[in-house]
């Protein structure tokens, strides 16, 4: 992408997004200005991403073609209002603030606004992105989606489903990491050395993801591993008895509801 890019509030998610796009050649580090409150954080961003940093949001957005709004949800509308007078009329604002609707953002700036929820695997080119647009910003959302496809899968949803989709992919990596942690700890409890437990768990999760990417239904893939009366059947029965499905349903509902209450 050519032109100046401003990143307002370059935290973990925004940093992962920008880093992934730079690594993929979709952004040039020298075109990016990222803001953060503390000098130490700005130094960390500059060292990690190689971008210019600033402590002033308004200065950062001047002449920017793309503005990534990465601040905390409670601050998103205020920050957009703060910089609204300095934004180019044809700038595109991409908000990654969880739960903040485009309706609220449009109250701060009447321009092109696209709502995006990335996830941290974007840093390794394996991201998943939920994209929704403000009314009248559909063309901008298409361009943003085209940009993001270089570093992951893009799914465009109506904004009323944005929070529900966030419960799948935005927060999803944490579920996977928690499952990995539980598998490793359980293996250690069974006597497997931790380094070997970790190696086996990571390989199992990565390989299983590759199989899922082939398009077969998860239930079909699971059935291929599960022999009647066998070891896997015993393990799956224990997981089902523990309410694994309802726990995930409850967790994702809680995630959606929390997102709705953030702005």
Image: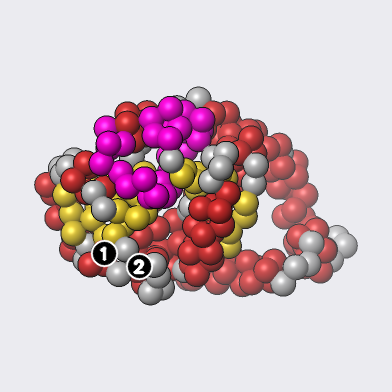
Point out the stretch of residues depicted in magenta. 82-110
Report the mark closest to the observer, 2 or 1: 2
Q: Residues within 10 Å of mark 2 (few under 14, many from 20)?
A: few
Please give the name of the residue rendered at 38% of the width and 50% of the height, measured from the top-left corner.
Answer: 91
Q: Nearer the viewer, residue 119 or 211?
A: 119
Q: Left or right of 106: which side holds 42?
A: left
Of the numbered discs 2 and 1, the one sitting upstream in the chain is 2
Q: Is residue 79 above or below residue 45?
A: above
Image quadrant holding the C terminus, namely: top left
Please give the name of the residue rendered at 43% of the width and 35% of the height, measured from the top-left corner.
Answer: 110
Alpha-carbon distance for marks 2 and 1? 8 Å
Q: Is residue 14 visible?
A: no
Measured as percent of width and height from the top left, residue 161 is found at 64, 39
Q: Find out whether the residues at labels 2 and 1 contact each other: C-beta distance under 8 Å.
A: yes
- Residue 132, picture quadrant: top right
Which residue lies under the disc numbered 2?
Answer: 2
Disc sitting over residue 31 in the figure:
1
Q: Left or right of 149: which side holds 74?
A: left
Q: Left or right of 44: which side holds 123?
A: right
Q: Is residue 96 above or below residue 222?
A: above
């Amino acid at each position: 992408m050519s032109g100046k890019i401003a990143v307002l509030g370059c935290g973990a998610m925004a940093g992962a997004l920008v880093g992934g796009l730079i690594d993929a050649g979709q952004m040039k580090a020298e075109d990016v200005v990222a803001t953060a409150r503390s000098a130490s954080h700005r130094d960390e961003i500059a060292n990690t991403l190689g971008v210019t940093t600033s402590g002033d949001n308004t200065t950062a957005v001047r002449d920017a073609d793309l503005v990534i709004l990465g601040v905390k949800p409670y601050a998103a509308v205020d920050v957009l209002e703060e910089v609204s007078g300095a934004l180019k009329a044809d700038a595109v604002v991409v908000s990654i603030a969880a739960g903040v609707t485009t309706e609220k953002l449009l109250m701060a700036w009447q321009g092109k606004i696209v709502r995006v929820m990335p996830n941290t695997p974007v840093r390794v080119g394996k991201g998943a992105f939920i994209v929704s647009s403000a009314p009248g910003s559909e063309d901008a959302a298409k361009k943003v989606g085209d940009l993001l496809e270089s570093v992951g899968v893009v799914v465009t949803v109506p904004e009323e489903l944005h929070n529900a989709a966030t419960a799948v992919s935005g927060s999803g990596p944490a579920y996977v990491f928690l499952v990995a942690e539980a598998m490793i700890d359980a293996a250690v409890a069974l006597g497997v050395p931790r380094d070997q437990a970790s190696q086996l768990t990571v390989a199992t999760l990565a390989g299983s993801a590759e199989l899922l990417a082939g398009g077969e239904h998860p239930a079909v893939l699971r059935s291929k591993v599960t022999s009647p009366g066998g070891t896997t059947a015993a393990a799956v029965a224990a997981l089902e008895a523990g309410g694994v499905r309802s726990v995930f349903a409850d967790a994702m509902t809680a995630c959606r509801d929390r997102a709705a209450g953030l702005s």
